[in-house]
Image (spheres, rainbow, N blue to C red):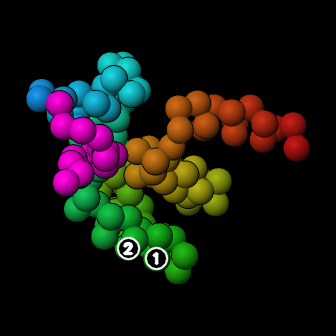
């Protein structure tokens, strides 16, 4: 009978069972100890911010419907981002910062920097 090692935070493996080789240990071997810290930080961020996804959805609706005062209050209160002025640039900057915070666990290291480097050249 095949052994299937399941864990919510790591990939499934279909290998013979080896005592002590937990999903965590297999993942460390596969990606390396340093990258496991990055993976763990991402999971911790997702777990800590799961309640904010509803607030993020509300913030996007406020932005879309141009409800500036509640948008600014929500950005400050729920995401610790202040909107410096009512100018469209400042409103958009705050939104981009919030999106970056919320999406951080899904971003590949260096993607934001590469995007910024490429953007002015277009």
Which residue is at the front of the view, 89 or 3? 3
Kind of element beneath mark 2: helix
Residue drawn at x 29%, y 41% as measured from the top left: 15
- Along the horizontal axis of the image, is 35 left or right of 6? right
| Mark 2–mark 1 distance (CA, rounded to whole Å) | 5 Å
Q: Badge 2 is on which residue? A: 58
Looking at the rendering, in which quadrant would you find the C terminus? top right
Q: Determine whether, in the image, residue 39 is placed left or right of residue 51.
A: right
Alpha-carbon neighbours of circle 2 within 10 Å: few (<14), some, or many (≥20)? some
Image: magenta residue range? 1-18
Residue 105's place in the image compared with 87, above or below, is above
Contact check, label 2 and label 1, Cβ < 8 Å: yes
Residue, disc 1: 61
* Rendering coords of residue 10 (x, y %): 29, 44
Picture coordinates of residue 68 (x, y %)? 48, 70
In this rendering, does residue 42 appear at all?
Answer: yes
């Amino acid at each position: 009978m095949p052994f299937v090692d399941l864990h919510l935070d790591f990939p499934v493996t279909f290998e013979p069972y080896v005592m002590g080789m937990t999903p965590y240990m297999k993942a460390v071997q596969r990606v390396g100890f340093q990258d496991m810290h990055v993976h763990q930080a991402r999971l911790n961020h997702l777990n800590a911010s799961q309640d904010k996804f509803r607030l993020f959805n509300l913030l996007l609706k406020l932005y879309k419907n141009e409800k500036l005062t509640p948008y600014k209050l929500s950005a400050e209160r729920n995401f610790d981002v202040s909107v410096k002025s009512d100018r469209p640039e400042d409103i958009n900057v705050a939104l981009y910062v919030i999106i970056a915070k919320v999406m951080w666990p899904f971003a590949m290291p260096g993607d934001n920097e590469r995007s910024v480097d490429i953007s002015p050249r277009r």
